[in-house]
Amino acid sequence: MKPLKQQKIAVLMGGTSAEREVSLNSGNAVLNALRTQGYDAHPVDPKEVPVLELKQQGFERAFNILHGRGGEDGIIQGALEQIGLPYTGCDVMTSALTMDKMRTKMLWKGFGLPIAEMEIVTKENVTELNPSKIVERLGLPLMVKPSREGSSVGLTKVNAVEELTVAVETALECDDTVLIEEWLSGVEMTVPVLDNQVLPAVQIIPDGEFYDYHAKYISDNTQYICPAPLSKAREEELHRLVKAAYDAVGCRGWSRIDVMTDSKGEFRLVEVNTTPGMTNHSLFPKSAATVGYTFEKLVEKILELSV
Ligand SMILES: Nc1ncnc2c1ncn2[C@@H]1O[C@H](COP(=O)(O)OP(=O)(O)O)[C@@H](O)[C@H]1O
Ligand SMILES: [Mg+2]
């Protein structure tokens, strides 16, 4: 194989999902990091360039930094497999599975891994929605979210039983499957995994009631603590859990797993991000920095793990 620095590399960024802007930010940071280190890297936006033509255009490898549907859900991965172009991150199956929060959680549950108690609502059965019965089982508040979306788009915190139907309808605008979850009132963390190695957790203290779009991308008042303040024993428990969750869904290369704690302090798995944000202030690089990776070296490592 040709050395990586002699290969023409496509940095896949942008795309057509709700997270397009976030992906462009990540993509430009990745592009700069590769070029600074002497890689022959070029930006490619699948919104404008057909991915199936990348090989004809001389590309030999792809760094995928597309977020959300169309880029993080197996579709691009399938196209890259078809033309035989190695790419960073998870394969078709894992990308498709983890884009679907409902199926990811059911799989984790099947492996005996902890998730929030939840109810599943679909476009077909929404007419049978019984808010008081759900509140009786899951309590209040509740979190309502579309199964396949990202960047906290379509999420609602429900504080009263009368608010549930509207919250479900809002989430159904993003996807035809919606999760109604018990409210996890403990702490929130996100845990990067790189090359099968669990990196230090980042604790998130959102500006507002939860880590919504504003708290994620706009606010200056969301706080991040890395490494998260955990006892040695709790940290080990978290690392074992995250590795088990990563392996259960078949992740490869890198991913970031969101974890929260419930009112009793028990860990609950929330979701997997298979192409985590990679701007200079994103959480994956923040954690990797604490174990000695500069942003540039992290980008290079992810590229080296491409298959
Ligand atoms: N069950 C829950 N209880 C309380 N807050 C939640 C719950 N699920 C998610 N959240 C909050 O909503 C945010 C986004 O949820 P998440 O499932 O990670 O979706 P996304 O793909 O949009 O990031 C989380 O970072 C967290 O702050
Ligand atoms: Mg999340």
Image (cartoon, grey):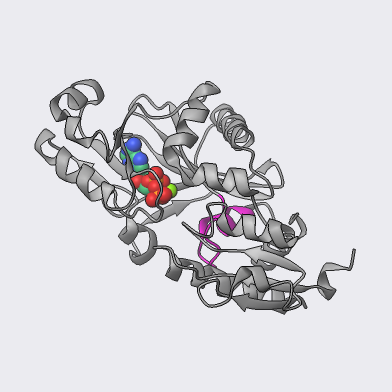
Front residue of 276 and 92: 92
Which quadrant holds residue 305?
Answer: bottom right
Residue positioned 67% across, 73% down in the render: 53
Residue positioned 74% across, 76% down in the render: 56
- Image location (x, y in percent) of residue 293: 69, 59
- Image location (x, y in percent) of residue 139: 21, 26
Front residue of 150 and 160: 150
Left/right of residue 43 with respect to residue 120 in the rendered view: right
Which quadrant holds residue 102?
Answer: top left
Q: Is residue 35 magenta?
A: no
Outermost residue toward the left in this view: 162
Residue positioned 44% across, 53% down in the render: 224
Relative vertical location of residue 175 with respect to residue 184 in this rendering, above or below: below
- Image location (x, y in percent) of residue 116: 38, 29
On-image quarter of the N terminus: bottom right
Residue range of the region highlighted in magenta in the rendering: 274-289
Residue positioned 12% across, 36% down in the render: 160
- Image location (x, y in percent) of residue 163: 13, 41
